[in-house]
Image: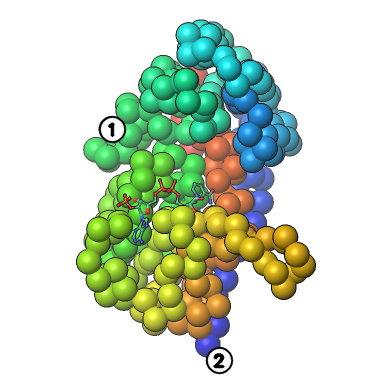
Amino acid sequence: MRQAKIIDGKAFAATAREGVARDVAALKDKYGITPGLAVVLVGEDPASEVYVRNKGKSTLETGMQSFEHRLPADIDQGDLLKLVDKLNRDPAVNGILVQLPLPDQIDENAVIQSINPAKDVDGFHLANVGLLSTGGDGLVPCTPLGCILMLKETLGSLSGRRAIVVGRSNIVGKPMANLLLKESCTVTIAHSRTKDLPGECRRADIVIAAVGRPEMVKGDWIRKGATVIDVGINRIPAPEKGEGKTRLVGDVAFDEAVQVAGAITPVPGGVGPMTIAMLLRNTVTATCRQAGIDPENL
Ligand code: NDP
């Protein structure tokens, strides 16, 4: 039976982190600069706690400075904005990430737009969104950035390939589509109102699934030999592992798709590991730009 090549996100992420660590060492040696990443966590959401802990640990492992700011869930917006302003002005902080989601009393967009775009390592500020959609060099959201790097490593040039992005969120779908366009793909963006989604997917050489619906993209939606990037992270019940147990699946029915695709990312172990690696990469990129250093020539 046919088996697609498995795109090993853990291996890509390990290589990316090694590259970041080398660049951090070069920044220290040649310029006396230690990049710093500030992560702001509001409240005690357990999933966010885990992300923030992992981000802090990974930041330190690459030789950068990590600044963690934990704020109570009932903090008011003015105090959060004051902290962001302080981080914007702190020269030791090169990247700022405010962990989402934020509590209801806080206007998420106001907080994101208050971050200095040069330090916006999530790439969500309108200035960075605008740069991406006009083909400029801003800071690019981490998950789509990881996807495009894995695609280029797997396929070489993406020019002229037909790509579909299923999902049009601001954090994944739209920036993903813009990155594919920048690589000269012919891009279709699909969403919940798309007619004949299976047919649209079957025309694509590259399928990006970023929907948030467990195993929605079936094997017979995939063209033979296509490359499949599964962004979805869905926790579903796994009674086979015992009562109350769960497991993670993507937005693609992996067992079916792996028999048709040319290459595919697994869940877990595909896109997920690359996201933090790209956050570290963005912090180095931001540091270099702030100091007027070409990150390509470290
Ligand atoms: P959102 O909920 O913001 O967006 C989901 C998108 O999917 C929407 O555009 C929606 O369409 C579309 N959609 C929903 N149902 C259907 C359907 N039946 N057919 C076609 N399209 C549909 O999700 P995110 O973009 O934030 O995340 C997507 C997935 O990626 C989630 O599983 C999330 O957990 C995961 N994720 C993983 C990351 C990682 O590091 N690996 C990082 C970020 C997200 P419409 O706009 O019409 O409503």
Type of residue at label 2? Met
> Percent from the top left, x then y, of residue 53?
70, 34
Q: Colour mode?
A: rainbow
Residue 240 placement (x, y as % from top left): 72, 73
Q: Looking at the image, is 105 positioned above or below residue 274?
A: above
The correct choice, above or below, for 245 with respect to 217 in the image is above
Q: Secondary structure at mark 2?
A: loop
* Between 47 and 156, the one nearer to me in the picture: 47
Residue topped by disc 1: 130
Q: Residue at x 55, y 83 (%)?
A: 3
**Residue farthest along the bottom direction in this orientation:** 1
Q: Which residue is mark 2?
A: 1
Q: x, y (%) of residue 42?
A: 59, 23
Image x and y of residue 144, in percent: 44, 48
Quadrant in which residue 43 is drawn: top right
Of residue 194 and residue 12, the one placed in the foreground of this image is 194
Identify the residue shown where x is 64% and y is 40%. Answer: 47
Tell which circle, 2 or 1, labels the residue nearer the N-terminal end: 2
Whether residue 30 is visible, yes or no, is no
Q: Quadrant of residue 46?
A: top right
Task: State the residue in front, 124 or 279.
Answer: 124
Quarter that holds the C terminus:
top right
Q: What element does badge 1 sit on?
A: helix
The three-letter code of the residue at mark 1 reads Gly
Assess disc 2: are there few (<14), some (14-19) or many (≥20) residues with their C-alpha within 10 Å of its C-alpha. few
Label 2 to label 1, Cα distance in Å? 45 Å
Does ligand 1 reach within 8 Å of label 1's beta carbon? no
Answer whether residue 64 is visible to the viewer in this image.
yes
Q: Is 193 above or below relative to 289?
A: below
Q: Which mark is residue 218?
A: none
Residue at 39%, 81% (x, y): give it. Answer: 220
